[in-house]
Amino acid sequence: MKKFFIALVFSISLFRAHADEGMWLPMLLGQQVYNDMVKKGLKLTKEQLYSINKSSLKDAILIFGGGCTGEIVSDQGLIFTNHHCGYGAIAGASSVEHNYLQDGFYAYSKDQEIKSQLTVQFLDRIVDVTAEVEEGVKGLAWADRVKKLPDVYKAITDKVADKENGLSGRIYSMFKGNQYIMYVYKVYRDIRLVGAPPESVGKFGGDTDNWEWPRHTGDFSIFRVYATKDGKPADYSKDNVPLKPKHFLPVSIKGFKDGDFAMIYGYPGGTNRYETSYGIKLKNEIENPSLVNLRDMRLKYMYNEMIKDPAVKLKLASNYAGIANYWKFFDGETKQLIKFKTFEEKQKYEQNFAAWAKGKPEFENILADYAKNYQEWTPYSKMRQYINEGINGSPLAAFAGSLISLEDKLLKPATSAADLKKAMDAATANRKGFLEGEDLVSDEKILASVAMMYYNDIDKNQHPVGFYETLKSVYGDLKDEATFRKWARDVFSKTMILDESKWNAFTASPTAAGLQEDPAFAFASAFMKNYTTKYSPLYQAFVSKNNELGRAYMKGIMQKDPVAASKMYPDANFSMRVSYGNVKSYRPRDAVFYDYVTTSKGILEKYVAGDYEFDLPAKQVELLKKKDFGQYIDKRTNDLVIGFITTNDITGGNSGSPVIDANGNLLGLAFDGNYEALSHKIAFDKDLNRTICVDVRYVLWCIDKLGGAKNLINELKLVK
């Protein structure tokens, strides 16, 4: 395996890994990084961290679902992950009569565990395939290279695919296309829900506490992975048995102190630490503010209906949580990037790079080309956000827009009856799923607001031709909010998408004209076609050019500072990483000190009976007031520790990641970052960055004392 890129150094401070910064590839840890881990307290060998031939920590870490991390904690395939990672599966298993999302759920025997649609993926091995990829695109111009890469990837991954054993390969671009690594995964398809706390525990603090410390959220859920009797992946079957894992994490209830070593394994989804000043300017001034405003509107209307009706809350819960999570993130990200003058710091580095690149034809025009590329795209950036977060933010409009592919088939004379029926059946099936999650009251308000915001905020030259003119002629003054409300009311009352008899009549004899006359389709298709025909090609060209420049810029940075002694790591891209640091308190601002743990004392102080965000089960309040902590008590605080913070470097995708002590034992589950360092996707803050974690002792207390599931406690290897 090539290790050249791992050892490269950035002598310019902007690109040097500071303090506990770094999402490292555990299979390619440089000796310097490993030595630094040992200095901080690590007691494990490199082979115990990652090994192909023997069981190691990496074998206990898995991709959970589509975008989270989980860990194996027993020899019977038991999985711990975050509550918000299992949220969709918990909600899917729930009904108004058996509301596991609201009330919690524990399986007291394996036959009570609930089937889910989830998958998990274990990392089998990794292979550096840089030489093969580069050979496959050798001599091609950038546009041709991009077109051919998927075929090159497929040719490489096909060699390792093994359907019977669930093996598949995925190639990751590292360092913006300067290195390629293939991860081979084993995918398991029979995953069952084992346990979850009541939502008031799993989401305690709600949106108010999201991205904040101090935190008192019991953000955990429990699943189990099943396989055939010989350990192979398989679809759900009553004959399947719990997986015997290669490795599982012992669970520590010893406790820890401020300064103790902490390591986090997982699958961070994405960072852009090598972003240019041009990208930060666009993000700060247009992209993030637009996204925040549009999500704020959607959340308001959804929340107003969710608090009125438990059935609506259950229906919208998962979608609402996802929208709210990154609404607050992007708001905080912009504030922190501005506060820490990240744009200005990037500019300083770029000036230094330009001076070095002068007279070097391969690099001297990179920054000028970046400036030109952003200048050409920026006028359309807000409009793209309003399509993605606005038009597609209305569930009705998003579903209506998905029917454009059906319209294409209806318009093509060559479409066979069989193909048309297949498309119509797919649309009907998708409609059923849409209706199951649709809340008419909130969505009607979202639709009206989206249309009005687009009209007011987007350059009139970028409006779909004729739409607003027609709306004005039928409904009146476009400066009046009531105009858009009347229009949205008519859309909802007249669309066949929400009318079973009209939909059945259409499916019996579908025509393009019939679809085009539908008011919901007419709205969605006008905006989406306007974007896809005029502006999507511009965006694709912008992204392609940025990627081309990014690869060259990274190569230049490497050549500029080739001293092989310091730290460099690739951006997160949902490949396995390890970060290391310490449990650590901090001072976010003058005269404010945040301790490294929160306790039951704090959760009772926040508790408000009946509150949407700060309620607790009555049994929990009673147990905590009695100080009935059992073996999970923390001797340093003489209390039950709820959460703790570390200096580890993580990002989205790390949700559910294990926080591991110096000896390889589980301390807790990472689930959030702190508001003071929400610039972390772009810039790591060495002083203020903290990872917020739920203490595993609180997890076990909830399982044992609150849930009565001692059978699960008995499965674990407790380190006391």
Image (tube, grey):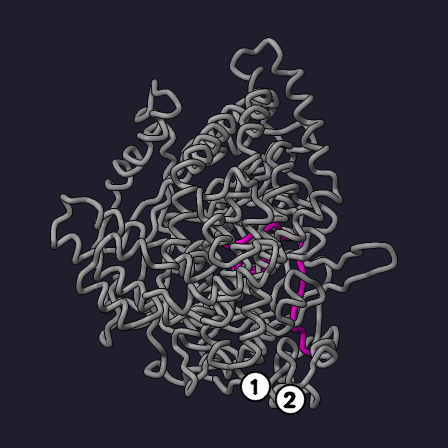
For residue 323, above or below residue 532: below
Residue at image coords 56%, 25%: 370
* Mark 1 residue element: helix
Residue at image coords 12%, 54%: 418
Task: Give the Cα distance between marks 2 and 1.
Answer: 8 Å
Q: For the residue marked with disc 2, what is the amino acid?
A: Leu
Q: Magenta span has 468?
A: no
| Furthest residue in direction top, as rendered | 359
The first of marks 2 and 1 along the sequence is: 2
Q: Is residue 694 rendered to the left or right of residue 13?
A: left
* Mark 2 residue element: helix
- In the image shown, does 186 or 457 lie closer to the viewer? 457
For residue 23, above or below residue 112: above
Q: Point out the image quarter for the C terminus.
A: bottom right
Marks 2/1 in contact by CB < 8 Å: the verdict is yes
Q: Point out the image quarter for the N terminus.
A: top left
**Which numbered marker is on residue 705?**
1
Snapshot quadrant of residue 666: bottom right
Residue at image coords 27%, 68%: 502
Q: Position of residue 592 (x, y in %)?
A: 83, 60
Q: Position of residue 184 (x, y in %)?
A: 34, 47
Q: Which residues are magenta?
A: 639-662
Location of mark 2 (residue): 623
- In the image shown, does 361 or 538 lie closer to the viewer? 538
Q: Is residue 715 visible?
A: yes
Snapshot quadrant of residue 186: bottom left
Q: Position of residue 438 (x, y in %)?
A: 42, 69
Q: For the residue marked with disc 1, what is the amino acid?
A: Lys
Magenta region's main secondary structure? loop
Residue at image coords 54%, 69%: 302
Crowd band around label 2 with a 10 angstrom C-alpha radius: few (<14), some (14–19), many (20+): few
